Amino acid sequence: WLLKQFGPDLGRPRYGWHPDSFSFTSFTPTLFAYLGNDAVVINRMTQEMKTTLASEKSFEFTWNGSQYLPTPQSTILAHIINGKWGTGYESPDGFDWEFDQMPSPAVNSSSVQAIADAYIAACVDRSSAFRHDSLLMPFGKDFRFRHA
């Protein structure tokens, strides 16, 4: 349907989104590669593995899938979301205006500079696990921004 409606340039999703999986197999990167994705965003893995990959600045890597298929058909670029509290895709501290237990400060003319500085600090912190200067910074978490 997407290809028919939008054509080959816009109708093919280029990126897979798989942040809340409970496990991966060697077929996972193969599946996303076969779907025609250029890359996939993942998240769930052991904290030990995330710590190791972060120390190596390897939160993006080439994920090799099935050893029985040619490399282009079973390999994909993977991006791990870097977040503090396990889910990885939560808003940075102070940027979740729907969570009542820890309300974020109101944005106004007297607070905007401090909030911008806090956002930049969060970006610098999260970017420490990558070898480049591009960063995917998700906002939300499960069931957030329902009233946006």
Image (tube, grey):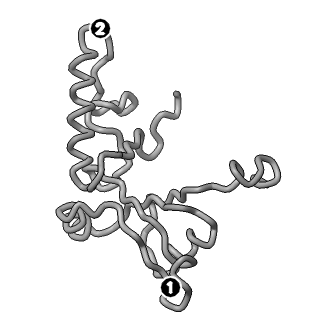
Is 74 left, or right, of 8 in this rendering?
A: left
Question: What number is the disc on residue 66?
Answer: 1
Q: Secondary structure at mark 2?
A: loop
Q: Which residue is mark 2?
A: 109
Q: Is residue 130 above or below residue 115?
A: below
Relative to 23, 93 lies left or right:
left
* Relative height, residue 111 to residue 23 (above, below): above
Q: Residue furthest bottom?
A: 68
105 and 77: which is toward the camera: 77
Q: CA distance from mark 1 to mark 2?
A: 54 Å
Measured as percent of width and height from the top left, residue 74 is found at 53, 78
Label 2 Cα neighbours within 10 Å, binned few <14 / some 14-19 / many ≥20: few
Tag on residue 26?
A: none
Work out which residue is located at the far top of the displayed protein and give it: 109
- In the displayed orientation, state which residue is furthest to the right: 4
Residue type at tag 1: Ser
Q: Badge 1, how many Cα within 10 Å: few under 14, some, many 20+? A: some
Residue 138 occupies which quadrant of the picture?
top left
Q: Residue 114: percent from the left, percent from the top?
A: 21, 20
- Residue 107 x/y as whole percent: 32, 16
Residue 50 % position (x, y): 25, 64
Quadrant containing the N terminus in the rendered view:
bottom right
Q: Are marks 1 and 2 in contact (CB under 8 Å)?
A: no
The structure residue drawn at horizontal position 57% and vertical position 71%, both measured from the top left corner, is 33
Identify the residue at horizontal 58%, vertical 63% (top origin). Answer: 37
Side of 117 relative to 16 (left or right): left
Q: Quick check: 19 left or right of 38?
A: left
Secondary element at tag 1:
loop
Q: Nearer the viewer, residue 40 or 142?
A: 40
- Looking at the rendered structure, the kind of residue marked 2 is Ser
